[in-house]
């Protein structure tokens, strides 16, 4: 790929120049800049398509004068309707990967590009990143928050207060790091399902539109000091992911049991069959994995097969909405 | 790829040798050999997985002493969980493609391999080929028959008589040719959905198992002269496929309307909205495409997006079961 100096891609160079000129000439109604990302996985096509429609019809979404940048996370993968080219873009933002000069993967280059264009070192950096995904799991609409950054919890609380969406708090999984939104001061993923990869679906489009509009509404309210924060937020805290049953050669020898297929967010107990096979055997949760009130999510997500994840297990917790969460979000939105 | 002579791949060469030895040593209970194919599309994983389970547990399916060959149509695509490597294997069996020496695509080579191993020029040829697929459309279980070969219609009639499955008769679409099963004297596709690509799903596995067992049962009955043929078969005859609405640049500007999403096999009328967009516009069938009693199938099949197919339109017809259909099937199964 043609580079000018210091490894800057020529396309990015011109985009950066464009953003500088844009910054000088555009009448900005807000200093807050929100990054809306779709197509971080190229075969999750509904949000990408929705962003295209918004571009064609600016009236589709009310922006309340906020500043937005919209971007397709992985345009090449989108074009090929694949999840990724070389590696999962949404696991490519770890410092180790970004700082490595040895890795030539498309997604690592793209992660750096996205940071150059919209990250803290950009000419016009974004402060909040919302990353729209879809899933083959029957999750409905949900929010995925990585770790416990106060501003994330505040924003997630605002959305939950408006739409009642479940919050999946992903933390402490060493094999799963480098999520895109973690590279911005505040951000989260919106997951909507079930939908097949590569399928535009009326329900998913509508749910994505509602989530997108609600984020914009709530960020605008937070900016104007009029947001209504809840007293508590309900969090599904990630405990661990479990794999499918495998035979001695490592081949998958069971599938999601009919009793829990499509039953994301519904608690399981000691007797709940998780997997079955063609011989009628069922597999329950092993004693060492079991605890009371476990709640499975991402059941049978197609893309997680390669990660050895049949589902993830969470516990539902009610957390008091802390004042400092709001303070941290305010620092980000009121500038 | 290493070749010995005349373009025969070395792996195929040894497989052919193996089949010869097998032919001499194996006590055959039947001269009829049925080819069961799964994974013709590598990301339709349920039937492939089921064949693996059958191999591990031969008691899973009753074979009634019939001879079977089971094969993964596109093993490389299966490994990568892709539909195909270079081109759709299930459009690669046309004479033009097979006879071309210029095309180096993986799927054309694989088509030739499959014919070498199981086709009429094989040491132990198969006479019937059943090809198990899945779809993201809400088709339930159905049979896809290509053209009007009497033996195909007879066998489809037997299955419909037992399970009530709809028959989709695909014919007369010049852009869609070269289907795998057409290269065997009798054969059809089994389509089961809805399921996401790359997802093992309890319902799809069970439905595939039922269809597979029923095919074997009915072929065994036909062979023993005990099959009960219906008086009529109900056929959904393909008329044409229609594309999504597109803007002046050719980009998809609408999606399947909520009123028909998931409504395969249900008749549409002049007023049925087929597509909608984010601005609330709906698209009905144009006057030149309309006729009474049209029935849509393959609504929103993910893999057909690249083919420019949003759905296919059929008419439902009741056909008298012809005696010569049965005679032709008998010639194939009673040998």
Image: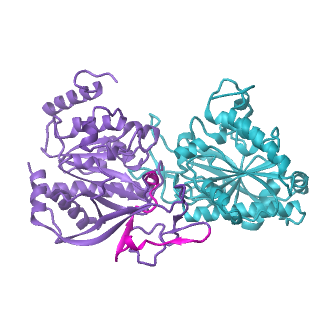
Chain colours: A purple, B cyan
Please tell me whether residue A300 belongs to the stretch shown in magenta. Answer: yes
Q: Nearer the viewer, residue B257 or A285?
A: A285
Q: Is residue A176 above or below residue B226?
A: above
Quadrant where the N terminus of chain B sits is top right
Q: Is residue A249 visible?
A: yes
Lateral position of residue A161 relative to residue B94, left or right: left
Image point 14% across, 31% down: which residue?
A25
Please tell me how many numbered marks the rendered image carries.
Answer: 0
Q: Position of residue B91 (x, y in %)?
A: 66, 39
Residue B165 rendering spot, x and y as whole percentages: 70, 62
Q: In the image, is B144 to the left or to the right of A304?
A: right
| Depth order, front residue of A285/B98 | A285
Hey, which quadrant is residue A242 in on the image?
bottom left
Query: Could you say where residue B225 lies in the image, as x and y percent from the top left?
Result: 90, 63
Residue A224 in view (yes/no): no
Q: Which residues are magenta?
A: A279-306
Q: Is residue A261 above or below residue B290?
A: below
Q: Is residue A100 left or right of residue A45?
A: left
Q: Position of residue B112 (x, y in %)?
A: 71, 35
Q: Is A160 colored magenta in this rendering?
A: no
Give the residue drawn at x 63%, y 50%.
B313
Residue drawn at x 86%, y 61% is: B222
């Amino acid at each position: 790929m043609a580079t000018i100096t210091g490894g800057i891609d020529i396309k990015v160079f011109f985009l950066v120049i464009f953003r500088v000129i844009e910054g000088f000439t555009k009448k900005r109604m807000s200093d807050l800049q929100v990054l809306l990302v779709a197509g971080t996985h190229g075969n999750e096509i509904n949000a990408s398509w929705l962003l295209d429609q918004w571009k064609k019809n600016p009236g589709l979404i009310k922006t309340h004068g906020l500043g937005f940048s919209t971007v397709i996370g992985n345009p090449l993968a989108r074009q090929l309707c694949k999840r990724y080219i070389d590696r999962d873009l949404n696991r490519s933002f770890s410092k180790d990967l970004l700082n490595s000069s040895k890795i030539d993967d498309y997604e690592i280059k793209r992660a750096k590009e996205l940071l150059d264009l919209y990250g803290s070192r950009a000419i016009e950096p974004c402060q909040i990143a919302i990353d729209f995904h879809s899933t083959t799991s029957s999750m409905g609409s949900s929010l995925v928050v990585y770790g416990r950054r106060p501003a994330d919890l505040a924003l997630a609380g605002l959305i939950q207060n408006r739409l009642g969406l479940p919050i999946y708090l992903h933390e402490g999984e060493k094999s799963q790091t480098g999520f895109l939104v973690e590279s911005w001061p505040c951000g989260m993923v919106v997951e909507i399902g079930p939908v097949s990869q590569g399928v535009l679906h009326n329900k998913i489009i509508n749910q994505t539109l509602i989530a997108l509009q609600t984020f914009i509404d709530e960020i605008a309210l937070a900016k104007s000091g009029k947001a209504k924060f809840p007293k508590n937020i309900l969090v599904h805290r990630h405990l661990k992911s479990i794999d499918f049953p495998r035979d001695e050669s490592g081949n998958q020898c069971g599938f999601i049991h009919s009793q829990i297929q499509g039953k994301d967010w519904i608690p399981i107990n000691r007797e709940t069959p998780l997997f079955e096979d063609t011989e009628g055997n069922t597999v329950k949760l092993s004693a060492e994995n079991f605890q009371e009130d476990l709640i499975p999510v991402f059941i049978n997500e197609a893309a997680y097969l390669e990660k050895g994840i049949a589902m993830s297990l969470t516990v539902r917790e009610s957390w008091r909405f802390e004042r400092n969460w709001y303070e941290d979000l305010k620092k980000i939105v009121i500038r």
